[in-house]
C-alpha cells in the first residue's frame, strides 16, 4: 500500500490520521485518531494550505496546523468537509488545531486520479464510469 521512502508530492496518495482540539495539544474536538486518504495536488485552485504544510514530508512525520475562525475551507478545500472532519457534526469552535500523523504515501493509478479530480469538483455529471459517485 505505501512506501516509506516516498515524499509527499503531486499526485501521490496520502494516508494520515488526525485529531483536533481547541488548544494546540488538545483533543477535545476529535479525541480518537481518524483516518484520511486523499490525492495530493488535485485541487482546481492549486494546493490548499494543508497541502502546503504537508509538502515534502515522509511517512512517520507528524505536525499541527492552526485553523482560524472562518478559515476551514481555505485550509482544507476539497480534501475534507467540515462534517466529515468532525464525527459528531460541525459546530464552529472558533480557532482550533488539527494534529496529524502521516501513515503512508503511495503512487496513484490514472483511474484514482480521475476519480479524485471528479470528486473534488463535485462530480463529472455523466455516465463516464469514473467512480466519483455523482451518477
Image: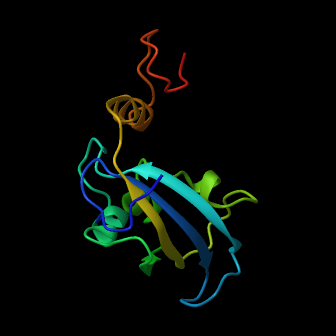
Taking 104 as reference, is 96 above or below it? below
Query: Is any part of residue 68 visible from this angle?
Result: yes
- Image position of 70 (left or right of 133): left
State which quarter of the image contains the C terminus. top right
Q: Residue at x 50, y 74 (%)?
A: 101
Image x and y of residue 132, in percent: 49, 27
Res 59 → quadrant: bottom left
Q: Residue at x 40, y 34 (%)?
A: 112
Which residue reaches farthest top? 127
Query: Is any part of residue 79 visible from this angle?
Result: no
Res 57 → quadrant: bottom left
Which residue reaches farthest right? 88
Q: Nearer the viewer, residue 57 or 96?
A: 57
Q: How is the image coloured?
A: rainbow
- Image position of 126 (left or right of 110): right
Image x and y of residue 104, in percent: 45, 63
Q: Residue at x 54, y 51 (%)?
A: 81
Q: Residue at x 66, y 61 (%)?
A: 86
Q: Nearer the viewer, residue 24 or 41?
A: 41
Q: Nearer the viewer, residue 40 or 13?
A: 13
Image x and y of residue 30, in percent: 68, 72
Taking 126 as reference, is 4 above or below it? below
- Image position of 1 (left or right of 35): left
Image x and y of residue 23, in percent: 58, 88
Numbered disc total: 0
Amino acid at each position: 500500500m505505501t512506501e516509506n521512502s516516498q515524499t509527499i508530492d503531486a499526485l501521490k496518495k496520502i494516508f494520515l490520521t488526525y485529531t483536533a482540539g481547541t488548544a494546540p495539544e488538545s483533543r477535545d474536538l476529535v479525541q480518537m485518531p481518524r483516518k484520511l486518504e486523499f490525492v495530493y495536488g488535485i485541487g482546481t485552485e492549486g494546493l490548499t494550505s494543508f497541502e502546503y504544510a504537508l509538502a515534502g514530508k515522509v511517512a512517520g512525520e507528524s505536525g499541527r496546523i492552526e485553523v482560524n475562525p472562518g478559515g476551514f475551507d481555505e485550509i482544507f478545500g476539497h480534501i475534507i468537509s467540515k462534517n466529515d472532519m468532525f464525527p459528531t457534526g460541525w459546530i464552529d469552535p472558533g480557532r482550533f488545531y488539527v494534529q496529524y500523523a502521516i501513515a503512508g504515501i503511495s503512487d496513484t493509478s490514472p483511474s484514482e486520479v480521475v476519480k479524485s479530480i471528479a470528486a473534488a469538483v463535485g462530480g463529472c455529471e455523466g455516465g463516464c464510469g469514473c467512480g466519483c459517485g455523482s451518477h
